[in-house]
Every structure is written in C-alpha cells, then in structure tokens.
Amino acid sequence: MSLILLVLIASLLLVNFAGLALLLRPWFRDHAIAKAAGVIGFTLLFFFIEHFAGLGRLVWMWPLTTAIALGVIWLRLEEIKAGLWKQELVFVIAFLFALAWKNSFPDIVPQDGQLADLSFVDNYLHGGTLPPQDSWLPHLPFNMCYAFQHYGAALLARIIGLEGGYAMNLAFAVILALLASLAWSVARRFSASRAACAVLVVAVMAGGSGIAPLTHFIMNQDAPNREAKAGLASDNVWTGMRFAGSYVDRINTDFGKALFPPLSSEDKPSPDFESRDLPLETIAYLTFLGDYHSSLGGFLLLFIALACIAALESTPVAPAVSNSAQATGLSRNRPLQALLAATVPLTLAMNPWIFPLQAILLLGWAAYRHMRKNAPDWSAILAGGFVTMALIYPFLSQFAPHALPLQIRMVASTDHTPWNVFLGLYWPVLVLMVLALTQMRRIRPALLAVAVFAFLLLLSELVFVDDSAAPKYVRFDTVLKWWEWIYAGAILLIGAICLRGGKWVRGIAVAVLLLVSTYAIDIASYWHNSGKLSAGKMSGYAWLIRDGADKAILEFLKSAPHGVVLESLDADAYTPSSAFALFAAQPSLNGWPEYEAQWRGASAHVTDNAQRNRLFYRGNLPDAAQWLIGNDVRYIVWSRRDQERQADARTRIDALISPRYAWIPVTIDGGGELGYWVRK
Amino acid sequence: MNLIYIGFTLALLLINVAGVTALVGRWISAFPLARATGILLLCTVFFFIEHFIGLGRLVWMWPFTTALSLFLLIHCRKALTERGFWRSETVFLLAFLYGFAWRYTFPDINNSSEHVADLYFISNYLPGHTLPPPDIWYPPHTFTVYYAFQHYGAALMARMFGFSGGLAYNLAIPLLTGMTVALAWYFISHFLQNGWYRALLLIVFVSGANSMSPLVHLAMNPPEFLGPGGQAQELIVGSQRFIGDSEMPSNIHVPTPLGLKLFPPLQEKGKPAPGFQPRQLPEETFGYLYFLGDYHPPLGSFFLLMLALALIAAIETGAIGKLGEGALAFTVPIVMITNPWLFPFQGFLLMAWIVCRLWQKRAPDWRMLIGGGALGFALIFPFLIDFAARSISAPIRPVQSTDHTPWTRFLGMHWTLMLLVPLAMIKPAGRKLAVALALTFGLLLLISEMIYVDDPTGDLYERTNTTMKWWGWIWSGGLIAVGTLCLASPVKFVRWATALMLATLCICVLDVGRYFYYEGKPSVGHLEGDYWYTANPANRDLFNYLKAAPDGIVLESQYEERYTDGGIHALFSGKTLAFGWPAHLDTWRTPVDDVWTMYQQTQQFYRGALPNSLDWLLAHDIRYVVWRPEDSQKNFGVFPQINGQIGSRYIWQGFSEPGAPLVGVWVRKP
C-alpha cells in the first residue's frame, strides 16, 4: 500500500515538474535548467509572499497545478515525442534511484543532524506568516537560520498534504534528481558520447573523493558476516569523506601507512596538537548520510550556475534535440545570464557559506567573457541579481540582524592540510585540471573552469571563517561547506570539458572518473548488507514507534490540538528529545539545546531551561507546575526512554503537577505506567 | 404512518437513482452501466472534494435533485421508453426490492457480525467534516485506517436525504446489491437468450449458493433443537464456512456418517504439530451477504466486479464506446478504497481482458485505459495519503504447507468452478473471451491457494480473511462470467452439464427460504436498526435523551473485546465514544496500547474500583457516562459507590421504572 502511494506521489511530482520545465523552456532553452529554475522560482515566490501573509492550507493546489501541467504536456506532446523525453528520462531515472534509496532508509534519526532538519521543515508546515514560530524554541520566531531548502520541503508537504518527514525524504530525492539532470545537461554540452556523460554523472552523483579508490588498500577489509560487511562499508564511506583529521589516524595497512605516515610526537608542533579535522563531503556521501542539510541546496545553486555557464559558453556537439537552440548557440541568452546571477543572492537564503564562492564563480565568468571580448549582458545580470535579492529581502531583513557575526581569518601554518592528505583527497581534480589545461586552445572555457576552481581551492587553504571552534575543528565548518562545493563543481565542469578533449585526454579523464566512482561500490555494499527495518515508512518515524506505548503517544500528539510538548533531555544534541513533537508537527519546549544555544548566540536562557528539564524528569524540580505553565507547556511525554532512565520519577512528577496536568496512561505494565500529561 | 414514510422515502431514493441513470444514460447507453457509473462517479467526486473541504449538511440537495430527476424522466420519457429504460429500471427495482425485503424484515443493526462496525464507519462520515473525519471510536484521532468508501457513499446518501445512520445502512444495502444484480443481469443477458438459463444463473448468484450448498445437506445434520429456522441458518453458514468451522468442537456442527467419509476430520496423528487446529477457510459469496446483513466492503467489491464484467460485455458487443474502456480501468483504483484485498484481483481481471484483446488482435484504447486509471488514482489520492501511511502492514506471502486447504474440502468448496473452467474451453473457436475469462478465474483460484495476505491474525485464522474475501469474489465472478459463457456454449453437452451443476446448487434457495420464513422477525419495519434495543422503553428514552443532548464524549462499559453492546448508545445517538471495540481498533491500528489500557480502566471504573475515577473521567473529557442493564448485572450493587465517586461533577439521569434494572446516564455538570 505504501509503495502504491509512493508511486502515485512520484508520478504526481514528475508530471508537475515536467509541466513546469516545459512552461519555462522557451526562456531557458534547456530542459534541466528550466526545471530547476522553475522549482526554485516557484518556491521563492511563495517564500516571498508568505513573509507578508501566510497562505495556510495549500492542499487544494495540486489538482490545479497537475491539471495545468497535464495541459502543457498535452500541448507540447510533439516536442516530447521528438526527443525531449530523453532529457526527462535522466531526471526520472535519477529520481527513482534517489527514491529507492530513501525508501530503503527513510528513518529521520537523532544520530546525525536529521531531527534538526525536520525541525526546520516543521517550522514552515503550518502556513502562517513568516518568520514562523521556532519549533525548538516556541516563544521565539525562527529567524536566525537559513532554511530556504526546508521551506521548499514544507511547501511540498502543504501542497500534497504530506507529513513533514515524508516531504523531507521526498524533497531530498527531488534535489538529487535535479542535480543529476543538471549534471547531465553540463556533460552533454561538451560531449556527444552518452556513455562518457553517464560516467561523469555517476562520478559526480555517486563518486567519492580521491581517497575512495584507495580505501580498500589502506584499511583492513575483513568482515565475517553481513552485519560486519555493512559496518565495514559504512566505515569505507566515512573514510572517503572524513579522511583528514579523523580517519587518517585509523589507517591499518602497511601500504596505507607508507602513503600516509602517522603523525609522530616529534612532528607535532606542540605536544597537545591534534590532526585538523578537514572533511570533504560529496553528494554521494550526503545521500548515504541522509541529512537534508543546506549543502544540498548549495549544490543545486552551483549546478544551476555551471549548467548556465556550460550552456552559455559551449558550442554545439550533439545534434539539436527539438529546436534550434543549440545550433544557434546560447552565448547571448539573457534569461540564462539572469539566472546565473540570481544564484548568487539565493545562496544567502539557501546556504550563505557558499556566497563568496558563488560570487567568485559569477565574477570569474564575467571576467572571462570580457577577456573573450564577448561582454556579458550586464542588464540581465543586474536584473537577475536585483529581483532575486528583492524576493529574499523580507527573509534577509529578519535573518541578518540575528545571524551570528563571523570573521574571516588567515589559516595558521599549523592548520594547513598536510600535503600528502591534500593530494590524496584532491588528485582527481588536479589531474582533470592538468588535462583541461592541455586543451585550453581548443576548449576555451577550460581556462575559466581551471582558473576559478584552482583559485578557490587555494583560497580555502589560505583563509577560513572563524566560528570560535576548538583547535582540531578550527577550519572544520569552513572546509565542510567550501570543499564539497569546490570538489563537486570542479569534477563536473572540468570533467565535462575533459570529455571534449582529444582521445588520450578523454581516456584519462574517464579513467579518473571511474576511479572516483568506486565509492559507489561501498555504498551499494552498505545497501545490500544492511538491515532495512523501516523500509517503505517514508514519514521517517518508524524507529521511534517500535514500542507500542511510544506509538500511542505519537498518534495522540499527531491528533491533539496545537500545543508545546515537553520531552526529556539525555543530551544537549543528537538525542531523541523532541522527536515526538517534531513528528507530530507540534512545537517542542527544549528542542536540542546545544543547537539552539549556538544559533541564539550562547543563550543562557536555553541552557537554563535544559537544566530544569533534567531536574523535572527526575522529579526534582520543586516549582515544576509553575515552570510548565510559564513556558506554556500543554503536553508532557513520559515514554519508554523515560521509564528506563528512572521509573519511579513519574509518581513524584505527578504529585508535583497533578493540580494542573492530567495523567493519561497508555500502558500499564510491570515497569509502571507510560503515557503523557495533558494540561487541564 | 411508518409505512407511508418508508414508501415515500423509497420513492424519493428511486426517483433520484432513476434521474442519475437517465442523465448518465445520455453518454452511456446501457442503463445498468449508466446507473452504476453515475452513482460511483458522484460518490468518488464528492469523496475527493471533501478531502479538501467538508460540505457539511447536504439535506438541502434532495428537493433540487428530485425536481431535476423528475424533469429529466418526464421530459425524456419517450426517448427513454424507446431505449428500454423502464425495462432496465424494472430489473433494478426488483433487485432492489429483494434486498430491501431482507432489510425490512431483519433490520436490526446489532452486535452480530460486523453490523455495528459498519454503522460506525458510516457514522464517521455523517457530520460532513473535511476528510479524514474525526474518529468517533478513537478521539481525538482521525478516521484514516479503514477503506470505507462504500460507507462514505451511504453517509452521503444519508446527508442528501436527511436519513439517520441506521436508515442509511438499511437502504444502502438494497441500493448497492440492486445495482450489482442489475449489472450481473446485464452481463448474463448479453450472452444468453434462454430465459431459463438466465434465471438459473441469477438464482444461484442471488441466493448465495456455492459448491458446498448441496454437499452440506449430505455432510451436516443440524440438530432438531435449533428449530427449522436455525437448521436452515446452520446449513447456509455451513456452506460458506465449512472448511475449519465444521471441525470446531460444537453441539451444532453435527456431521453425518457420509459427511465423515466425504470430509474426514483431521486426526491427531495427521496433525503436523501437537495442538494444531484445522485452518478456518471460509468463502462468503455475494448472495450470502443478504443473509448476513453486513454493509461490509465485500459488497462494494462485488459491485465493482460486476461493473467490470458488465463493462467487458458492453465493450465486446459494442454497446458502449471507448468510454467503457476508461470506466473499466477506473474500477481498479476504486477497489483500493473499497476493499483493497481485491485490488490485485481487479487489476488481474483488467490485465486479462487487455491480453485477450491483444490475442484477438484488437488492441485496447490505451489512452482511455490510462486516462481512466489515472483519473481513478487522482480521485483516491487524497484518501491514500493518510490511509497508506497508517494502514497496517499486510504483505503477500506464500501459503505454508500446513496452511493449505485439505484436498477433499478444496474440491467440495470449488468443484463447480473447477468444472466450469475446462467446460468453457471446449470448442474455443470464436470464443476467445470465454477462454480468457475461464483462465482468469481458474488462475485466480490457483493463486488463492498459493499466496495469502499476511494480516495480524494468525494460527488457524492465518488465511481466514484472505480466503473469505478472495474465494467469494472468485466464485461470484466465475459463476457469472464463466457460468454464463458455458451456458452460451455452442456445445450442447457443455450447456446441459452446466445447467445440471447449477441446478444442484439451487438447493440453497430452500435453505434461504426456510430461514426467511421461520426466523423470528421482532423488528420488522424498524429501519433505524435499533429496535432490538429500544423495544425496551427505558433504553428508548435513554437513546432519545442522548440523541438530543449536545455533542460530547460518551463512556460505556465493554465486557468483551469486540461484538458487544458497549458503544451502541453513542453510535445510535451520533456521539463520540471514549473508545470503540478494542480488538477491532487493534486490528486496524495495531498496536493500540492506550485503548487496551482504557479498556482495563473502564472495567475497573464500572466495578467502582478505579482510583481517582472522577479525575480519570475529566482527563478523558468524558461528558456522558452510560449505565445500562448489563452493568447492574455484572457489577451488582456498585452503582451507589460510583455515584458517590463522581457525583460531585456528574448528575445522574435515570430512565428505568422502579424495580427494573437501572438504565441512565451521568451527565457532566456545566
């Protein structure tokens, strides 16, 4: 049944997105770009409007939009039959792959940052005027984080009538499919060979860093059973991403130790020196991880920009699909230039960390055009930038005053990436850059691509954004956000350019891309060997309701009137606390205090409330009822987790709050009672 | 007075149905199909719309729809008469009246079988809230866990005509069965000219006869103490539930010596494991549901099955345009919200027809098929969003060797269809449809023995739900489709053999007739369905009081996990019950720990043994606490104690006469 629903939802999305792409295609002249621009533009328009007036329930929309989409498809049927379906096919295949992955691993669990993502989506679910109530700090508005991508997932939920978790899993698949189709668009601009393009798209979407092909040689690969094999595959996947600083210390083969000798105490600049944690995450890793982080949105803006650049700068290699767009060239196309410019301000709402990178990419392209004596259309660029800026302005006016101040500093000598680790991670990009440079005369955009990405890579080694992290993590956040962008962009654009090179260049490039793609083997191994207990349960809470009492609590909260939920804290982050509230689309009093405290600028109020929560759940908060009423708490959860922590605390709590809160048991067993309190 | 009211009610309903038929008949010339598709489309479109916005009270509609219907019928009477409209209406009317006769005679909606559960499904939809509606058996949750489309249809009728839930229940059954029989008749008439053959098929179909019907007369000997009505009932039930049920220890299931030889009971040494119990593998045929009186989802799937068969007949004979192919595909998604157990089978039937068309080298109209299917899925999509996410997991699994049907019993239950299938294939030239349909139902029977739907029930009931739903569908569809085509065979032997087989099944008519004649009829004509309870004046007064009282949650005692009277006060008065039958809620929503806890606490409450009972009532927002005669019996002398516990916030309203068992309700003070 759930599979049938998923198929129906997928069909609905495919039809709507296809209609949107067909509608915008006359302007952007590229199916993938039109689709991505349409999806983002549609979301942005709602994002803008809802800062003035929340539109509430939107479930009435899908029949309307579907009817329009079907009408557009009907009108353009000849064009689709003539060959456009092939471009649609890339999106469909990628979407089905992504959906199959999400369908296998739909859980939104507390071990990573997924509950934080869900809280962002939840904020926007109710359709009120923006900024919305913060579901992790209900007395404050959610205006201190950039969550445009989460707004998109919530919009999807509101239009189709889905739960937040379901929509988040679905939106994840949509973004991945958009990325794949954009990557295909870039590849096809430079290569006539579909096989070569497919290799590039696989390398970009499922590939790892330069460490990926080495993992099996530098780490012991013994695994006696399926469970161990799944664990090993997971380790391999992590090794490819968190190599510098974390996994480099776990190398346990002679070959590995020869390549990456462990840091001896003599080599350390100071006795307490720790290797710097410098993560390089790829799209494949983020898919594996399952976090609906803003990185995905960052990739989307990057790929849109690269697809625009590829469309603007390439000369035709393949026969025109259905119109004369490619034959005449798109170098003067104004909508594409406007869209390219629009991606820069959009980063502020999507993922501000990459704002400078996206800006440099745009400026690099503009400089390249001037150098080529083919000046960009500045009016289109200014219009694209200005209109987008105006559309995100209502958000920015809320967000900017609450954003944490960050400073850019030079990287200290001890914080640089060790040269062998840097080479290990980046050799595929470096090889592709060298290959592209050999083709500079034939393929002009090679200069632009190599110059921009080489400069950004260098920049990432010279400066960082100082967010006052501990020494081991001093560059962590910067590198996390920047390297993934640089790496994916470089592989895609420079890789595509190399595919257009001479035979040798193309051959070597394909070999490099295939080596990078070996990362997918570990991911496939993980998929094959791991248990899929929650398969098909796309709302993401199957893990939470394995116990009957917990299921009853969640079901009640889902149906109960809107109200603040209290759940116990075992840790300040990466804890199941707030899961009941989030999956029931209710606000949680404490959320994850560590996250909230950080976002709110080390708020003492947040940490103080967290401390009271701990006292409360042990039955030791003297003014418990007063504290609850003061914080407008309506529901208090007493789940299996709470019983296992301290079963006898429940009666003490009940004695403290019974005048104002009624106890509703859902299970009474040998261990005591489980259930919830409801404010009288 | 009651008769006049019922008569006019029927007239109103039938005029509106005829109006829909005449209107849709402009596009679909075959009137039984026009009637069925028109009403189906109306219900589906309302169902779709009300997932976006509940339309509330609709009682203002009937004057308009009735006027429109009358206008259409009068204005177009000539054309309608020429097209055979009145003949078609007569068939439907007779079929409707047969069903109505059952409900008029036995109108009680009581705790037997699924009567109460079906009324509960209907009642969820009565207020006209945006769907999914609040669950009146499980506040504050919404009713998302059951495929109750046909109940929505009954509630829509109730809202349009201002019927109570009980009346809607008792009128929806004849309406749905009437349309189903009219569709079956359409299929039969298309292939058969011989009136005797037509009548024979229809009698077997409507009486609920199956292959076991004659055999139970040989194998079972219902004891005298049951009386003639009870004996007939035993034979009717026995024909459907013979496999497994007949081996349960009981003083009712008495086998004959011949029965023991024909169907030897499982011996201790033959058991695969100690304690192994024979598997309960029932078959519920279409006609059996008249007797059962449940307004349960199999009715809806029989309707959709006959609609599909009638559409196939109409398409094959050119009586319907391309629209018919779209309508055929449309039925498949609708099965999903009516009785999803049959979704794969309805899909299989559609596929078989497509394959048959390709075999005939007459490709179907793919656009219409895809369009019809897509429209159906689009209309049910808003329902599926909530339903699919919360429905329990019930995967399809292969049947384990120990769960297979014992072969003699399998033969006993299916011998007719097993013979009809090869008979239909004799002299196949020019009869590809006959071969295709025979193979389809034959294959489905085979499949039903190889796989099953693994729902939460287990052990001897592992396959019960599956065979109950599947076998009845296979038999009823096979009987009409394959039976008709056998009787239309060019080979005399096939026709005669089929007629002979079907004639032997007609012994069921005797059982049904005896049951109808001899069974007690204390509630005849009380179509609200509550007379079995409100015949007692105190109960009646309590019902009336609650019906007029403002909305609020009602608490009633429940001493059994399901099939109890606990809950009927809330149900018949349109109120929300604190919690419904726990075992049913558990089946639909498993697990429901909170319901089981509430069940235990309610029993404690009615024993006067629940600590803080007043707080407990208030915490659950209970407004009415019902005390019924059974409470006094089960908890003798406890009433004053409970009154003392809750009297400070709840006022007692008694309805019983002095000396009679207490009946009444505590009402929360404002």
Image (spheres, helix red, strand yellow):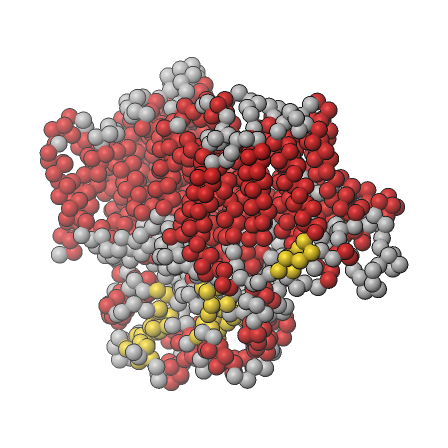
Q: How many marks?
A: 0
User: Position of A258 compared to B242: left or right?
Assistant: right
Q: Nearer the viewer, residue B497 or A259?
A: A259
The residue depicted at 62 percent of the width and 24 percent of the height is A193
Figure quadrant of residue A649? bottom right
The residue depicted at 40 percent of the width and 50 percent of the height is A46
The residue depicted at 59 percent of the width and 40 percent of the height is A364
Residue A534 drawn at (x, y percent)? 59, 51
User: Position of A411 compared to A567: left or right?
Assistant: right
Figure quadrant of residue B407? top right
Q: Nearer the viewer, residue A668 or B371?
A: B371
Residue A106 drawn at (x, y percent)? 57, 50
Judge whether residue B588 can be spotted in this image.
no
Judge whether residue A25 can be spotted in this image.
yes
Asked if residue B535 is positioned above or below residue B424 in the image, the reply reads below
User: Position of A79 compared to A282: left or right?
Assistant: left
The residue depicted at 48 percent of the width and 23 percent of the height is A328
